[in-house]
Amino acid sequence: MSSIHTVLPVLVLVDTNGKGSAGKIVFSPGKPRSAVVLFEDAPPEVHDFGNAELTGSKMQGYSVLLGPHTLATKPGGKPLSFRGRAACAAFRPGKDELALVFAAEDDSPDCTVWRINPVNGADLPSVYFDNPSSIVYSSDGELFAVGGQNGDVTVFRLMENGEAKEVRTVGVGGAVRSMVFEELENQLYVATDRNMLVSVFYEVEDDLPVQRGIINDECSITNRSLKTLAYHPNSNLLAAGGIGKEVWVSNPARQSGRSIALRQATRILGLQFAEKEDCLVVIGDHGVELVSFSIDSEHLPVFEQRTVTFTSIVNLMGCHHYGELLFIGTLLSFPLD
């Protein structure tokens, strides 16, 4: 079992410069090169970590300040700008690509998923979809999925020319809240507002089912109002969380799993498995918890409370685990001149 006590937190301090109320930060995968800040009442901002400075030490702790000086710019030096408030965002692994879903004036989702290059602001071919509510890229960056308020889910293959070619569209019976790819068996896991986990085969032969249906874990996650999912390819584990302090981690192949209760959280906001370690990062409404686990003979996770570390963060916006670093996004408590 890998240790989580050597993880070094890096506070990513977001200076909104009075722009609005920042609600969430999304980091680019792997070693963060970019981050997008989503505001509750203003257009999003894209920040370039190449313009930021890491300060501090291992003993004192590290921090990075994101502000007007770190905004991503177009070739002429003008910061990237957007037309309205973004509801969700996702970065494409291995590519300079950012997908954004904007909210209409009446707060209903737009019918366009905008794709841009976050480095230079160049527009990429958009994806048109009715009322998108969730977007996700596959870990290899070859696939892109969009889920909607009406329960439709479409998987696209991203072509070399930038176009998105539809692979398959299915209905999952409820507004889509979160999705995650599992490429080994060509599946997409979907959490809906009806508290269901659905497994969809996105590339199948004509004689195979498109949708496997509700995962048997559903009976174990009743009344959790699922909001977020994460998948760990090395151990074939799927984590799910929402309302409440428990996270359900299961092995879909075994149709069984186990839950772990967090210390103070009443709502799970985000989940991430560490890429090379048996560690689950849980973002709750009271902070961040890191949970180590091992795999038993039944290929199920085994959690021990003594392997859990808790970091209480005020104004938590999101976090991202990379190597020995845990980037924790939070609002700057006071504006800088």
Image: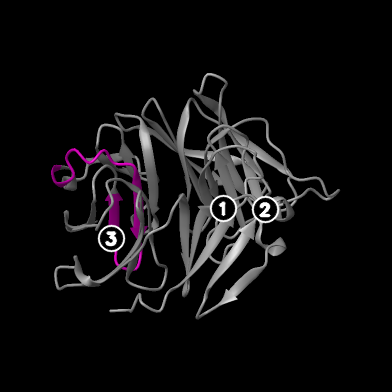
Residue 208 seen anywhere in this rendered image of the structure: no
- Whether residue 29 is visible: yes
Residue 4, magenta (yes or no) = no
Is residue 235 part of the magenta span, yes or no? yes
Q: Residue 252: image x %, image y %?
A: 23, 55
Callout in the foreground (1, 3): 1
Q: Position of residue 14 (x, y in %)?
A: 59, 52
Asked if the residue at tag 3 contacts the one at tag 1, i.e. Cβ–Cβ closer than 8 Å, the answer is: no
Q: Amino acid at mark 3?
A: Leu
Task: Give the left or right position of residue 76, taking residue 114 as reference.
Answer: right
Q: Nearer the viewer, mark 3 or mark 2?
A: 2
Residue range highlighted in magenta: 219-240
Residue under label 1: 332
For disc 3, the marked residue is: 237
Residue corresponding to mark 2: 336
Name which of mark 3 and mark 2 comes first in the sequence.
Answer: 3
Looking at the image, residue 302 lies above or below residue 19: below
